[in-house]
């Protein structure tokens, strides 16, 4: 009977609550520095659209699908061009900043110990933190795409969209394809968030965690452009990110998309598990 009475007084693990998640999202989207970061993300489509309106492109180059040469034909291409520009640096940096701050930020401010004593189960806390990171990755991608669509349609108009395969689709179907691109890229960026969540459990310095994540991401881009390392390319974090262009073909080239999703899923599984293993055994002193 005494054991039953003691067990009745112990806090029971609770499932992930909407209140906890809402509090985390409010923390992320309510900070002025994050608003400043999102303003930078939104500025790129504006710059791209205005620059192309003033000086229309004559051609393009580089890896991945070229959207710049088609910007003047349909405003949706502004969103796609902006996404392709921001993918190597700005979008990963935004996600890395949020992910690096997820656990390390709490430890740095001295709130982690008090948060866990509420009590909040460590696994539950990690689930909420990573869910918030995924939501931010999706929101950041939509912000870039949405700003691009708005500026593009105002300056260049809409109408039927010519896909990379030459097929024409309606503007509405083009928006659906663009939304699918955003979902794909959000999953890829969530892999960056998973790595960031793990790194954030290793340190109490959010800036250090963010720098480490960006070194890994930028390093992956560099390695992916070295032909002599082609054997390594399929295993790199960023190798399949530009496969989003396959969603703009008719029919959709699902092989590249599924490979990219599987790669991102593998990174997420490995690093979220590593974060759980590290955080569940960590002594929290701050």
Image (tube, rainbow, N blue to C red):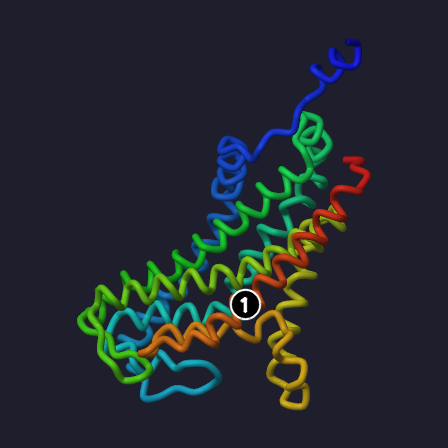
Q: Residue at x 67, y 31 (%)?
A: 115
Residue 46 occupies which quadrant of the picture?
bottom left
Task: Say few, some or many: other residues with alpha carbon within 10 Å of mark 1 (under 14 / 14 to 19 / 20 or more).
Answer: few
Pick the front one: 89 or 269: 269
Residue 285, above or below 168: above
Q: Position of residue 122 (x, y in %)?
A: 69, 37
Q: Position of residue 108 (x, y in %)?
A: 71, 41
Q: Residue at x 22, y 78 (%)?
A: 168
Q: Quadrant of the C terminus?
A: top right
Pick the front one: 204 or 155: 204
Pick the front one: 53 or 67: 67
Q: Position of residue 188 (x, y in %)?
A: 53, 64
Instruction: From the viewer's perspective, tell me whether residue 178 is left or right of residue 62.
Output: left
Residue farthest toward the top in the current orientation of the protein: 1
Residue 41, above or below 164: above
Q: Which residue is mark 1?
A: 89
């Amino acid at each position: 009977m005494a054991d039953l009475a003691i067990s009745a007084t112990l806090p029971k693990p609770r499932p992930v609550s909407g209140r906890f998640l809402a509090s985390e999202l409010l923390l992320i989207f309510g900070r002025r520095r994050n608003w400043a970061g999102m303003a930078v993300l939104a500025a790129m489509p504006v710059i791209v659209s205005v620059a192309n309106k003033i000086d229309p492109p004559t051609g393009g180059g580089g890896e991945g699908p070229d959207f710049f040469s088609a910007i003047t034909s349909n405003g949706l291409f502004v969103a796609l061009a902006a996404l392709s520009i921001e993918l190597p640096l700005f979008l990963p940096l935004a996600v890395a900043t949020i992910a690096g701050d997820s656990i390390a930020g709490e430890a740095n401010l001295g709130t982690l110990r008090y948060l866990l004593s509420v009590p909040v189960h460590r696994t539950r806390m990690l689930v909420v933190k990573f869910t918030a990171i995924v939501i931010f990755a999706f929101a950041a991608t939509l912000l870039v795409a949405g700003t691009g669509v708005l500026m593009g349609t105002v300056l260049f108009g809409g109408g039927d969209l010519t896909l990379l395969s030459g097929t024409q689709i309606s503007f509405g179907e083009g928006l659906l394809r663009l939304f699918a691109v955003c979902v794909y890229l959000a999953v890829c960026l969530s892999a960056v968030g998973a790595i960031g969540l793990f790194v954030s459990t290793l340190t109490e310095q959010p800036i250090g965690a963010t720098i480490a994540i960006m070194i890994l991401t930028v390093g992956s881009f560099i390695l992916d452009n070295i032909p002599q390392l082609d054997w390594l390319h399929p295993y790199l974090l960023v190798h399949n990110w530009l496969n989003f262009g396959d969603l703009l073909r008719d029919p959709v080239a699902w092989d590249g998309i599924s490979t990219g999703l599987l790669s991102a899923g593998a990174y997420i599984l490995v690093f979220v598990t590593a974060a759980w293993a590290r955080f569940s055994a960590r002594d929290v002193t701050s």
